[in-house]
Amino acid sequence: MSLTDEYIKDFKSGMIHRELAKKYNITEGYSSKKASLLITQGKLVSRNTPKEIDLNREERIVIEPIPKKPIEIQVAPKREPITSTVNNIKDMRRIIGIWDDHNPMSIPQKANLQLIKDIQPTHLINGGDALHLSYLRAIANAKGRVSLSIEEWNKIQSALKEDYRSYNVILDGRDAAVPENCEKTLLIGNHDYYLEILSKKCPDIEIFDYKKHLRLKERGYRVVPLNKEHTIGKLYFVHGIYFLDHHAKKTASVYHRNIRYGHKHDVQEYTTTTPLGQWDAYNAKSCGCNCDTNPDYIRAKPNAWTHAVYLAYVWPDGSFSDYVIKSVSGKFVYGNRIYGI
Ligand SMILES: [Fe+2]
């Protein structure tokens, strides 16, 4: 038997190139080239040829493709129907909300008052930051003792008296417009809160008693403390907490309720994403403001402040239809009527 025949026999027996190189005293590379030449001459068959792979089929691992299933279309379960026998809008709870007056920077009230008269709300919500009170910020937030000259104190007192006087005019207008049995609520805002702090720090200084000076009890207002909520049906009302750009998303994500709020002075809305059929999606709406959109203290900086009034109709089961009605130059259109003219 020639050396080539013996090489062919060894190759066919399964010897690898390292073993062949050792036996025939050649390099592995030479063995590989020799095998390739013999394959081209038809004297050997490549080991890579599937025919030569001596594998028992039963030992092979078979990965089957995932069988295709027909696409299942998930139908969202129907939401609970509105369980109401109400046929007349006058039998529904009707809410008007006005956020962030920031008196004395409040805008003219004509359009809001006309809407109140038309809607005849069962609930009126004052969303807070009723008074601006920037001159109280430093003394309210001071950690230590505050010492004021008589002149400074007199200035604060007269500013506060004037703010109470002018805001009482606004509250009087709203009181005259709402029906007699309208439930009124004031949500304390972060600016109003300066007076809460000062009335606690100085209980003997009567002028800090804003509830008395605004005659809130006589007017029939329920006062909701800062950051607490007021609920009507499935709606939750707060002054507002977050000041970041996407505050509606943050508010909806934190409260997991249908939250209506002001605070940031713009109009925004966000609805949470929820698994269908497990619970209802929640929605947060910021309801704009009712104060000057370019006050002195922001020095004409760009801002997103938007004038708006809030209106909601609530069904007996708490479901609701609600709107944030934006106004321009004290005017808006709602229900085919121009308000503010
Ligand atoms: Fe505000």
Image (tube, grey):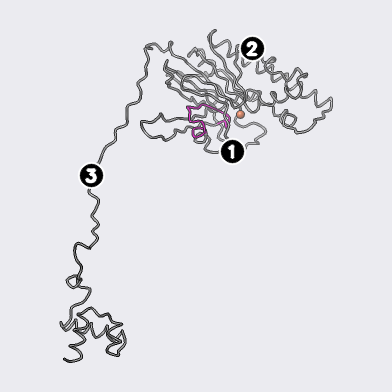
Dot 3 or dot 1: first in sequence order is: 3
- Mark 3 and mark 1: Cα distance apart in space: 55 Å
Does 11 sit above or below residue 252? Answer: below
Q: Earlier in the sequence, mark 2 or mark 1?
A: 2
Q: Earlier in the sequence, mark 3 or mark 2?
A: 3
Q: Which residue is mark 2?
A: 217
Residue that badge 1 annotates: 302
Judge whether 49 appears above or below 84 on screen.
below
> Is 196 rendered above or below residue 72?
above
**Residue 94, percent from left and from top:** 47, 16
Residue mark closest to the camera, 3 vs 2? 3
The 10 Å Cα crowd at callout 2, few under 14, some 14 to 19, many 20 or more, is few
Is 82 on the left-hand or right-hand side of 257? left
Task: Give the amino acid type for the residue marked by disc 1 in the picture.
Answer: Pro
Q: Residue at x 16, y 83 (%)?
A: 43
Please name whichever residue, 51 or 146, is drawn nearer the observer in this view of the structure: 51
The furthest residue to the right: 150
Q: Residue furthest bottom?
A: 2
Q: Is residue 257 magenta?
A: yes
Alpha-carbon span between mark 2 and mark 1: 39 Å
Counting from the top left corner in percent of width and height, residue 113 is at 54, 16
Badge 1, how many Cα within 10 Å: few under 14, some, many 20+? few
Helix, strand or loop status at disc 3: loop
- Between marks 3 and 1 in the image, the one whose residue lies nearer the viewer: 3
Q: Is residue 285 magenta?
A: no
The image quadrant that residue 188 belongs to is: top right
Secondary structure category for the residue under label 2:
helix
Amino acid at the residue labelled 3: Lys
Report whether the residue tagged 2 is closer than 8 Å to ligand 1.
Answer: no
Question: Which residue range is magenta in the image?
Answer: 251-265
Q: Is residue 163 left or right of residue 184?
A: right
